[in-house]
Structures are given as structure tokens and as C-alpha cells.
Amino acid sequence: MAEIQPVRGWRYNPELSAHIDDYVSPLFDVVSAKQREALYRNELNSIHLSVPRGDDPAGAALQRLTTWQETGVLRQDEMPGIYVYYQYFRLPGSSREYCRRGFMCHIRAYDWAENVVLRHENTLPAAVNDRAELLARTQFQTSATHGLYRDDDFELERYLDEAIADPLYQTEEDYQGARDVLAVIQDARLIRRFQQVLAQRQVILADGHHRYEGSLAYRQARMAAEPHNTGQEPWHFHLMYLTNSAADDLRILPTHRLLLELPGALADAEFLTRLEPYFTVVPKDDAYDLPELIAGKPWAFGLYLNGQAYKLRLKPEVHQQLAWDTTAEVKALDLTVLHFFVLEKALGIVGPDAQRTWPGVAYVRNFSECLSRVDRQEARAALIVNEVTMEEVERVCHSGAVMPPKSTFFYPKTIGGFLFTSIRDDEHHHAFYAPHLAFSTGL
């Protein structure tokens, strides 16, 4: 199954690493415009490599990277390793501190058809092309995508816990309120065990589909240009943060749907009338009760429309009308029900492709923001949803299908700039990277 390799990480030099909070950045697809401008003002912040700007962004990133490497801003570790990455965080309204345990390494950039790395959502070609061009020019990976493997025995966690007791550095608090801690495992025996465990597993791509497909596109281009490659060149691999999907510290937050418009200037009363053949529609006094009212109930949603809250519950007998050509696992999802019976049947936005490109819907994670935007008349209505479970993600991925857009928001996000890796041709010259050299001696 999944082939992983240790990496010689590139990191900020020790003086800068002591203030690592100043140099990390959110991922390219979640950084807000306001955050971006603030980060650009720091000439050494990692955003200059991950989200470069200018007439030739990729060229600007390469020039800056070269300067940082030549002047010692970034330094490469002498020995390859697997980098342990823990994120400590709390959820709103909870006093519990969670800790998501994982590790960063290189994983072979498998094509989707190989059924080793599994996706759960589709990508936008423009975003993939942007990531592929940046990777081709710099041959440098600035942030790890997030992958999930399942190990109910939790074998690797004890090695991770031992390593994290001696961290390389940590943030005080990143942009999302998490504390990020980095350590490294360089023991060849342990690394070999990590490889053996992952060799028996498939990996579900939780976050970073565009960056992963960018690596796929680059690998395919290099293979076409170099048909006699060995298969072990660094450009075959991709930087990934791997976590155990069996852990209870893996959190998926809901992403609500904000209807910016109702097609055809649909009146509120008519919208409700169109919902009634499919849903039980019950008015509620307090919109802030909606998350609790729908929690744990399948095919249940909150609706906030013109200052009035409603609980929606699909009538079970109408579910068989869900006619999209997809798997039973996808049809069972709350969000599939919402997109089919609300967006398609009630609003007339027919089919997943049309819905993906319809400008009348926005995806908002903050519940209070949904209500306030409707109150400010920035949107016509808010549809409040439950979170997707990890079991649902696994079932859908193993069925070979994908979820509706913005189905999952794995929290917290990994951060950019915590660890960099290179896929230049000279990266594989270290003997540790060659399995037949590294482990045939019984290390």
C-alpha cells in the first residue's frame, strides 16, 4: 500500500526558530486577505514561498527561496527523519484540550486510480495548476497536506509521544488558536517500523487536495520527460502529515450553507412551500437553538430565513427520490440530502456540477456569522448542518465516490512554514533514502 520515506527537512535557522510564530502562515486556501497582507509585511514569513505574488509569482518564490538558502535563513537537517507534529487545541465552548498526534514524511504521489491515496472531494483545475507551477519552479514543499491512516492498535503513537518530549520548537499560538509542536525521529529502526505499518494501509486525503494533485501533475510531467527514471527520485514524493483516523482527537467541524440569493427572486413564503413536499418544517423561537435541535439527527437541518428559525427534517419516504448517479454511501449523507432536495428540487439548481459553480451559495463555518449575515441582508437564508463523521468519510472514500463540496473541515489546519522539504534531484543521494541500502543491513 502506501510507501513513505524520511526527509531531510529544511527549517528556519535556530535564531529564527526561537520565534517561529513570526514565520508560520495559514495554508494558501484558508488565509484571508487581511491575514495575507499582514504576513507579507514580514520579509521572512513563509507566505512568500507558499502564496507568492507579483507578475511572476513562482519565479519570485524561487528567487526568495534561493536567497534564504544561501544566506542561512533556511537550513537543512543533516540526517533524514520522520517529523512528529502535535497540535494542541480547544473547541469553542469546551474546556477540554485536544491533542492531534501525527507525523510528517514523504509519501509517493499515487495516482487516484492506484487506490492507495483516496480522495473525498473534487478539485478546481485552476487551483491545481497554480500549485503545480509553483512546485515545478521551486521543487520545494512549504506545507504538508493532511492524510489519514487507520491503526486501531495505535502502535506508532508511543514512538510519537517519546519524540515529542524533546521538541525542536513550538508555537505559542497559531492563527487559529492551536499550539503546534515539532520533533523528529531519526532512529532507522523506528523509521523502518513506520514504513512497515503504512505499507499495509491506504491513506485518505483529509485536506490539501489541490496541493496533492499539483504534486501528481508534476510527477506525471517528470515521468513523461524521463521515461527511464528509477521510481525513487525525490519528485515521485509528496510532503504529507499523517494522523490516525481511529483517534478521538480528530475533529471535523460543520460547514454551513449561506444562500446569498434565491433564484428567480423567489419569495420567502414560496421557498417554504417548495420545501414542504420533502421536509417536515417546524418554526422555532430561537435561532441559536438550531445546532442543538439538529445534533445527532440524520437528515435534519436548521433554516434561518428573514429573522425566523425553522427545523427541517427530511421525510424518510422521499429519500428514495434522490436520483443522483452516486453510491449509497454518498446518498446517505446529510449534505447530499441538502444539496439534492433544497438546492436542486426546491431552488432548481440541477446537478452537482451546476451547484459547484452556482454563485448563490457561500460556505461558512461560523454559525453566528451565518445568522448575522442574514440579519444584515447580506444573504437571504442560512442552512445549518451537522458535522460529517470520520466513519462517513471512510465509508464514502472506500466506496470510490466523492462528497458534495465543502463537506469536511478538519480542525485544526496544519500550518505553513513549520517544515519545508525539497524534491530536487540531489535530495536522494543520501543512502538512508534507498531502501535496499538503508535496511538490508538489519538496522
Image (cartoon, helix red, strand yellow):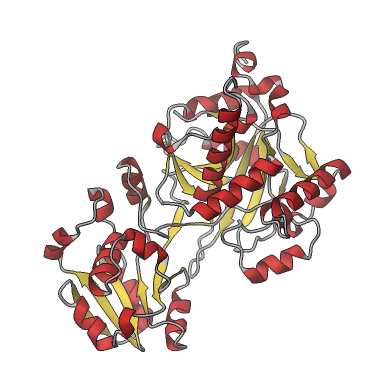
Q: Is residue 388 left or right of residue 342?
A: right
Vertical placement of 49 versus 113: above or below?
A: below
Q: Position of residue 384 (x, y in %)?
A: 36, 72
- Residue 10 falls in which quadrant of the image? top right
Q: Quadrant of the N terminus?
A: top left
108 or 289: nearer the viewer: 108
Query: Does residue 106 show up?
Result: no
Q: Quadrant of the C terminus?
A: top right
Give the residue drawn at x 65%, y 49%. Answer: 181
348 or 37: nearer the viewer: 348
Q: Position of residue 6 (x, y in %)?
A: 63, 30
Give the residue drawn at x 29%, y 84%. Answer: 266
Vertical placement of 234 versus 328: above or below?
A: above
Give the residue drawn at x 86%, y 43%. Answer: 72
Q: Position of residue 196 (x, y in %)?
A: 50, 24
Query: Does residue 76 show up?
Result: yes
In the displayed image of the protein, which residue is found farthest to the top? 441
